Image (spheres, coloured by chain):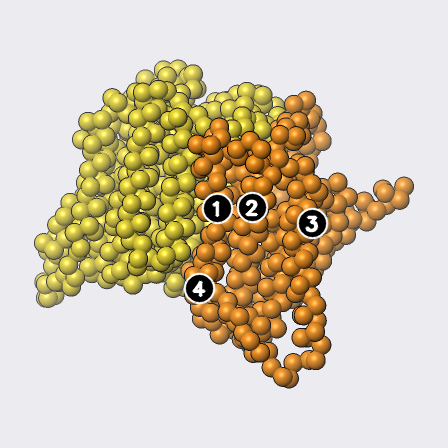
Amino acid sequence: MSGVALPLSFFVPLLTALVVFVIGVRRAYGVILLGALTTLAVALYVAYAVAVGGPQVHYLGGWEPPLGVELYADGLSALMLAMTALVGAGVTLYAGPYLRGKGHDGERFWPLWLVQWATLNGTFLSADLFNLYVMLELLTLTAAPLAAMAGDRPSLAAAMRYLLLALLGSMAYLLGVALLYGGTGTLHLREAGELAGAEPYTAVAAALMTAGLFAKAAVFPLHIWLMPAHSNAPAPASAALSALVAKAGLYLVLRLWLWTFPALLSAPMGWLIGGLGAVAVVYGSVQALRQPRLKQVIAYSTIAQLGYLLLLLPLVALPAAAVSAWHGVVLHALAHGFAKAGAFLAAGNMIYCLGHDRLEGLRGVTPYLSVTLLALGLAFVSLMGLPPSGGFLAKWLLLEGALAAGQWFWGGVVLLGGLIAAAYSFRVLALAHAEVPHGYAEIRSPRRLPPAMEWAPLALVLLAYGMLLGGVPILELLDQGAPEGVR
Amino acid sequence: MTEWAFDALLAGGLLGLAWQIVASRVLFRSVVLFIVFGLLMAVTWARLHAPDLALAEAAIGAGITGALLLSAYRAFLSRRGTDPGPPPVFPRWAAVGVAALVGALVGGIGWVVVGLEPPEQTAGREALAHLAISGVENPVTAVLLNFRSIDTLSEVVVLFVAFLAARVVAQDLAHAGPGDWLRASRNEPVLVQPLIAFIAPMTVLAAGYLLWSGEHQPGGAFQAGAVLAALGVLLRLTGRLRPTSEPSLAERLSLVGGVVLFSAIGLAGAGVASAVLAYPEGWEYELILLVETALTIAIALPLVLLFSGSGGLRREVR
């Protein structure tokens, strides 16, 4: 019966969204909180069930694949689901006061965000390539209006650019799925992999699907939409988009290459995809160093941090590196989710209080926003990969794997990315802790932060540190249903 | 020989139209040609023995999409006062580069597809084999509403989300959609009222027929919803429906009712049948028809509202 939790993690947030839309946000705030808490409980239950009983399966409609759609939760799905639920709960708590205070339209935000949450859960659970296409479409269509929420010219242009690129990505993905179905006769993720092997049509399908997902996940060189879209969205939307939505695309890339196309994962292919990841790490970090606004820094940091996830593909084929790299990359996805969501919410607090997020204007802000700055600082520490953060654990494992297999190049990329991350982090933190320039009146915080907004970022960031304590059970959960080479 | 000639004509027509749509310097011309393209595409689907797709393409691809494009074009006009003029010129070398890349891609995919050996066992054959226990006789409906109903449910959520997205970027009502709302007045041409009095019930009848016949022949909720939406477009254009900025309670209920009902029946399936989205044995046909009826409304309403460019619609008595 535990299998019912899998569809519930899709239906609970979806139905909450629809109820909220019908009865209106003013009367439905309790419903929103109840829906978010239920979703969190369901997600944690799925993680528990997987940890205790191994991978969970639910055939929707009772039809087994290839006829029907299968929901499947292994350790990877369960962890992503739980991370999404924790970040989602934080975003939900934060968004209420933020939207009220900034005058954003909650009547649109809440249904969009709750449908997006449902879709994220669906993406992590679905084991059907076409169903995943529908989920990807829903992700894009909820993300674009959230990015356009501010309604001014830059955010509209950014959302439009995102929409067009993401739709192009969807088309490429769908074309790949069609090819794969034409060759194998099934849409099931693992079955198609078993039937496909390394043939010309699988190679073309893999290329199309990967390229499509790269557009959705802003992998270099298809990253151009991410910075404007994520930095112009309202802070809670930025947090969800950066920590969860873009990552869902990369989650699928890893899922496809490890479960469906392992036969195609040759050394040159691994180097090509890993190389794109490495370029993203360096390019995103360097760009983050040059941005004048805090949210732009954090958005470019997302491009860099997502690049690390691709470093798995060149390492996973090497037996000496595979297990550590796999553990490191998944932990990185989790730690980045918590830290990035916390950082964006903290930046939202700056905007809420100061009315802007220009780095130069952050001087002297310390005494007023101390909790927020603590959250921002701790988030940056995790993004750099310093102990005792989850980011440290992830990068350590990744580095250990790379060096154990003698892959100095990939180890160097991890170290270099961490160094530049330190540079852009300290640039922000130094300005925030700087004295007010001589001759300027001391700035005063014009608005007090509501408690939910003050503490939500810190709570999320602390989860990234809690990962260090929970490292062993997390990795044991991850081993449930992991493919052969990485157990 | 005639079949071959017909196919060649279709393929040539599609390519020629596509070229004209992309190459035309006049936006309005491109929009109209795109509608023609949709109709030709519908004929092509029919020729490929996919009548369900042909119906959907004609109703949604050519019909509603065309209306939406024209509505967007009209919004352009009222903003600028003139035709938006020729689009910005793309550098020739870049255009050639992109064309070469896309050509290579299409060629590569085509080469792979031609060499593809169709598998023995496919999900499609499975669906045909299980048709008898699906509760309906049309295999497409069986797949959409029974075997893979989660996809259909999510697609209707897509429409709902598209409506919300349009609301996020919405303009004020005066510039919305097909332009200022004009009350249907005594000055309107004398044939409008009798025509609507004839067309409206006929359209509802046609939508109902499409919905009902989807059980055993081509048709179903999407086609019926698109036909109903066409009626909405007509009533909006002739001033019988007045745009409002926010949806009323009844409209909000209709927008989400289909998905809520579908989800409720689906979740109940975990208790009374084997799994979520499973129908209890013996009730498949009745429940599928019920769900499809609710979905038809949930498909038609967002389409009309997208065309109207408004949050809601109100009936206007002349």
**Looking at the rendering, in which quadrant would you find the C terminus of chain A?**
top left
Disc 3 marks which amino acid? Leu
Q: Amino acid at mark 2?
A: Leu
- Which of marks 2 and 1 precedes in the sequence? 1
Depth order, front residue of A153/B41: B41
CB contact under 8 Å: marks 1 and 2 = yes
Q: Colour of chain B?
A: orange
Disc 3 sits on a residue from what chain? B
Q: Residue furthest right?
A: B1
Residue tagged by mark 1?
B261
Q: Label 3, label 1: how many angstroms apart (C-alpha)?
A: 26 Å
Q: Return the disc, 3 or 4, that comes first in the chain's sequence.
A: 3
Nearer-N-terminus badge (2/4): 4
Q: Residues within 10 Å of mark 1 (few under 14, many from 20)?
A: some
Q: Determine whether the residue tagged by mark 2 lies in a helix, strand or loop.
A: helix
Mark 2 / mark 3, whichever is N-terminal: 3
What distance separates the C-alpha of mark 2 from that of mark 4? 24 Å
Q: Can you tell which chain is drawn yellow? A: A
Q: Residue at x 14, y 56 (%)?
A: A365
User: Which chain is home to disc 4?
Assistant: B
Q: Which quarter of the figure has residue A243? A: top left
Alpha carbons under labels 2 and 3: distance apart: 21 Å
User: According to the image, label 2 marks what residue?
Assistant: B290
Q: Which residue is mark 4?
A: B248
> Which residue position holds label 3?
B55
* Amino acid at dot 4: Ser
- Mark 3 vs mark 1: which is more N-terminal? 3
Which of the two labelled residues, at mark 4 and mark 1, occupies the earlier sequence position? Answer: 4
Residue at (56, 36) in percent of width and height: B283
